[in-house]
Amino acid sequence: MSDTDNPVPVDPRLLEILVCPLTKTPLTYDRARNELVSRAAGLAYPIRDGIPIMLPEEARPLDED
Amino acid sequence: MAEELSYRAEAAAEYDRAFSHVSAYFVPFLLRAARLGPGQRVLDVATGTGIAAEAALRVVGADGSIVATDLSPEMIEKARQRLDKASNAFVAVEDGQALSLPDESFDVVLCSLGLMFFPDPLRGLFEFRRVLRPGGRAAVSVQTTPNRSYNGWINVIIARHVPGLAEATSRTFALGEATRLQSLFREAGFTDIETCTEKHSFTLPSFDAFYGPFERGGASTGQALASLPEEIRRGIREEVRRDLADTGGPIEVEMEIRIGSGRC
């Protein structure tokens, strides 16, 4: 199952406070891909079963787009 | 590194049975060291199955909030289940040395029996200080020595048979000295640094009640056991039984922790 199949929603109050663990800059929520995007780090952090996975080694490099 | 630090599914599943009553016993001392009070915003790093977070939630009440993090997705899933009914508790998979939380956003940071597993504990404490508001407090608990650890002494026995485990076990107790904790807090920029020591003897109804969860893969001990052939496991079991002077009745296991805390 991919991360985007029937995504469990993340609490928006948590999304509001999370920053990029590398750059500590704000993230944007990509609803379609169910990812938290850090433009500064060039990484998209996955959300699995409603739990943000804030680890760079688990993140998708944005240049794959 | 991540592999060594993150618990596999069975370890998370048996962890509660193996160790949660031990963790839970010491949590109030940690909350006291953190000066936890109603309405506070709390970060619980290396929350495991969420034991400290759940206790903290009761203290901070509906006006406070908890963010509970762990490196292991299996552990964080357990923590979410434990905290599920609280609308002011949030979970995320995080590296305690590189948190995805903003500067000065918490009143208290807790880390219950977790900091000693960080590859770089000082980096962790720097992160704790970064996310604390000025005047906020971080409190961590660590194990002291294998002989006064609930299961560390078993790991020492197992380590004779598992290459690499001896090093991992000694690392588990690397922060056990009060002076070591104090200097780490000082180096990370904390003030008003305190340490204290708490000890308790746990009585279990039988040897199996104590050892069974480890035999089923619980915690670091169980994971190490699972990697061994049956015959060696049997030998270790007998050695542990002998050390506990098991006669078929209740047994006693001692555990000591050190708590360090400091103000941001």
Image (cartoon, helix red, strand yellow):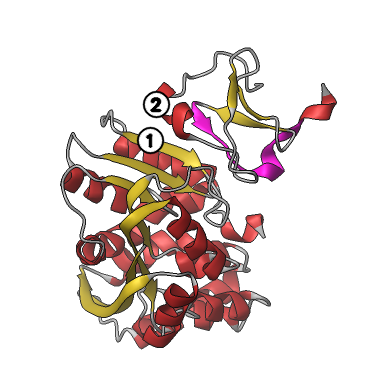
Give neighbour class at mark 1: few <14, some 14-19, many 20+ (Cα, 10 Å): many
Task: Locate residue B152 relative to residue B33 in the image: left or right.
Answer: right
Is residue B142 depicted above or below B138 in this figure?
A: below
Amino acid bearing label 2: Arg
- Where does residue A44 sit, x and y in percent of width and height? 68, 30
Residue B161: mark: none
Residue highlighted by disc 2: A13
The reply to whether dot 1 and dot 2 touch (C-beta < 8 Å) is: yes
Chain containing mark 2: A
Residue range of the region highlighted in magenta in the rendering: A50-61
Q: Nearer the viewer, mark 1 or mark 2?
A: 2
Residue B260 shows in this picture: no
Disc 1/disc 2 C-alpha distance (Å): 9 Å
Q: Secondary structure at mark 2?
A: helix
Mark 1 vs mark 2: tell me if same chain.
no
Is residue B57 depicted above or below B257 in this figure?
A: above
Q: Secondary structure at mark 1?
A: strand
**Quadrant of the drawing holding the N terminus of chain B:** bottom right
Amino acid bearing label 1: Phe
- In this view, the residue farthest toward the front is B134
* Residue nearest the viewer, comparing B17 with B148: B148
Is residue B77 depicted above or below B262 in this figure?
A: above
- In the rendered image, residue A52 lying in the magenta stretch gets the answer yes
Residue highlighted by disc 1: B90
- Where does residue B14 sit, x and y in percent of width and height? 41, 53
Q: In the rendered image, which quarter is residue A64 located in?
A: top right
Q: In the rendered image, which quarter is residue A36 located in?
A: top right
